[in-house]
Image (cartoon, rainbow, N blue to C red):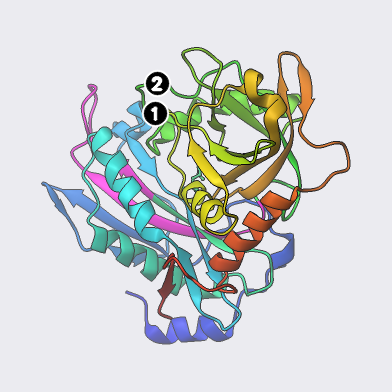
C-alpha cells in the first residue's frame, strides 16, 4: 500500500518529461499492481515499486506462451479529470481470452481496482491536458508456476503497469501511414487471432519487419485461407469509407475485436449518418471503391492509410501530399474529443478515476 501523502505530493509535482516529444516506448513509472492466483483463488494484490518479475524457469508463459494482455489509455481532461475509455470492454476481452488459453478469469472488481490503483499511484506520470500524450495501461496475465510438459500453469500473475506515451506511429496526430500486405499469416481462421494472446504478436514480428523494409509503417494481413479478404493490421483494425458512401470494416474470426473500431463504427453511423457494414472485404476486387481507409486501435487511434503494398506495387488511396480525408478527420475529432472529455460523453464511454 502506498501512502496517500505520496499521491498528493505527486499531484503537485508532475514528472519533468518533454510530453510532446514522447514516442511509444516503455518508461519506468513508480508503481505497478500485481496479484497472484494460487490453489484456485485470486489473492488481493498490491502495488509494487519493482518493475522486474521473478518467475520460475519452467513457467508456461515462457515456453508455451501461456499469457495474454490488454492495452488501454488514461487521459487528462481540461478540468483535470483522469479519464479511461471503455475499460469494462478491456476487462471483458481479457475475461474472454483467459479461458481460451486455460487461464483463470480475472474478476471484474480486481481488474478495475488494479487499473484504478495503478493510474492513481502514478498520477505524476499522467501527461497533462493538451500535451498530445497519454498514459498507456498494460494489464497482463501470465502463467508463472513450475512446469515442464505442455500443461497449463499452476500459478498465475496478473500485473498492470503504465507508461506515458506519445503517438504510436512516428508521425504525430493524424499523419498518413502506409501498409504492406504480408505473405506471412498472423492467425488461422479458427486459431487465436480474435484473442489478445501474446503468441499472435511473436508470430507477427517478422511480418512487421518485412513491411518496414518495404517502407510501410505496418503489415496488413489478409485472411489466411485465401489471401483475399482484409483481416487487420499488425496492431490495429481496418475501417474504410467507400466511394459508394458506405462505412465498412472486415468481419473475420481471426481479428482482434477492437474497442476503438466498435466506437468508430458507432460514431460513423450515429454522427455521420453513414450506412455501416461489417463484412468480408475483398482487397483486390474492392480497392478501387476505397475512398478513405483508416487503421484504428488504442495505440494507433485512427490513422489514415494513404497507400497499400500488394502484388509487388504500391496502390494509392491518397495522392502524394494529401493529408487526411474529411470522413476520417471528422471521426478522429469525435473520438479524441470524447476520449479527452472535450465533447459530451453521449454514449457513456468514459470512466473517471477518482484522484
Ligand atoms: C492486433 C490488434 N488489432 C486491433 C487492435 C485494436 O484494439 P483496441 O481498439 O481494442 O485497442 C489491437 C490493439 O491495440 C491489436 O493489437
The foreground one among 324 and 168 is 324
Residue range of the region highlighted in magenta in the rendering: 140-167
Q: Residue at x 38, y 52 (%)?
A: 90
Q: Which mark is residue 300?
A: none
Residue at which label 2 appears: 189
Residue farthest along the right direction in this orientation:
321
On the image, the x and y values in percent for residue 349 come to 44, 64
Task: Classify residue 105 as left or right of residue 233.
Answer: left
- Residue 283 sits above or below residue 140 on the image: above
On the image, the x and y values in percent for residue 158 come to 31, 51
Magenta span includes 161: yes
- Residue 331 sits above or below residue 95 on the image: below
Residue farthest along the left direction in this orientation:
39
Task: Classify residue 3 as left or right of residue 249.
Answer: left
Magenta span includes 253: no
Q: Secondary structure at mark 1?
A: loop
Q: Residue at x 60, y 24 (%)?
A: 207
Mark 2 neighbour density, 10 Å: few (under 14) some (14–19) many (20 or more) = some
Q: Residue at x 52, y 57 (%)?
A: 270
On the image, the x and y values in percent for residue 170 come to 73, 47
Quadrant of the image occupied by residue 247: top right
Residue at which label 1 appears: 253
Q: Are marks 1 and 2 in contact (CB under 8 Å)?
A: yes
On the image, the x and y values in percent for residue 339 come to 54, 65
> Does the Cβ of the disc 2 residue fall within 8 Å of ligand 1?
no
Q: Is residue 193 visible?
A: yes
The foreground one among 161 and 330 is 330
Q: Residue at x 68, y 72 (%)?
A: 130
- Residue 64 sits above or below residue 136 on the image: above
Amino acid at each position: 500500500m502506498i501512502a496517500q501523502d505520496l499521491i498528493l505530493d505527486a499531484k503537485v509535482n508532475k514528472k519533468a518529461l518533454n510530453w510532446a516529444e514522447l514516442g511509444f516506448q516503455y518508461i519506468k513509472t513508480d508503481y505497478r499492481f500485481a496479484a497472484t492466483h494460487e490453489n484456485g483463488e485470486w489473492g488481493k494484490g498490491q502495488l509494487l515499486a519493482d518493475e522486474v518479475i521473478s518467475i520460475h524457469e519452467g513457467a508456461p508463459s515462457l515456453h508455451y506462451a501461456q499469457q495474454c494482455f490488454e492495452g488501454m489509455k488514461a487521459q487528462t481532461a481540461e478540468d483535470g479529470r483522469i479519464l479511461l475509455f471503455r475499460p469494462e470492454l478491456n476487462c471483458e476481452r481479457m475475461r474472454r481470452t483467459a479461458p481460451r488459453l486455460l487461464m483463470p478469469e480475472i474478476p471484474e472488481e480486481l481488474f478495475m481496482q488494479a487499473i484504478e490503483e495503478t493510474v492513481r499511484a502514478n498520477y505524476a506520470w499522467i501527461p497533462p491536458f493538451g500535451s498530445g500524450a497519454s498514459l498507456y495501461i498494460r494489464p497482463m496475465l501470465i502463467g508463472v508456476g513450475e512446469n515442464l510438459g505442455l500443461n497449463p500453469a499452476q500459478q498465475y500473475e496478473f500485473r498492470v503497469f503504465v507508461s506515458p506515451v506519445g503517438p504510436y506511429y512516428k508521425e504525430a496526430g493524424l499523419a498518413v501511414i502506409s501498409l504492406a500486405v504480408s505473405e506471412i499469416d498472423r492467425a488461422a481462421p479458427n486459431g487465436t487471432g480474435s484473442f489478445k494472446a501474446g503468441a499472435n504478436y511473436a508470430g507477427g514480428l517478422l511480418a512487421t519487419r518485412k513491411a518496414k523494409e518495404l517502407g510501410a509503417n505496418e503489415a496488413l494481413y489478409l485472411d489466411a485461407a485465401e489471401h483475399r479478404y482484409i483481416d487487420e493490421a499488425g496492431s490495429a483494425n481496418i475501417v474504410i469509407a467507400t466511394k459508394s458512401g458506405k462505412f465498412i470494416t472486415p468481419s473475420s474470426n481471426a481479428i482482434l475485436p477492437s474497442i476503438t473500431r466498435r466506437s468508430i463504427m458507432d460514431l460513423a453511423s450515429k454522427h455521420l449518418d453513414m450506412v455501416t457494414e461489417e463484412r468480408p472485404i475483398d482487397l483486390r476486387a474492392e480497392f478501387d471503391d476505397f475512398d478513405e481507409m483508416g487503421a484504428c486501435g488504442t495505440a494507433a487511434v485512427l490513422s489514415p492509410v494513404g497507400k497499400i503494398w500488394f502484388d509487388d506495387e504500391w496502390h494509392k488511396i491518397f495522392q502524394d501530399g494529401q493529408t487526411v480525408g474529411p470522413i476520417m478527420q471528422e471521426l478522429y475529432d469525435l473520438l479524441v474529443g470524447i476520449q479527452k472529455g472535450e465533447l459530451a460523453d453521449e454514449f457513456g464511454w468514459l470512466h473517471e478515476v477518482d484522484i
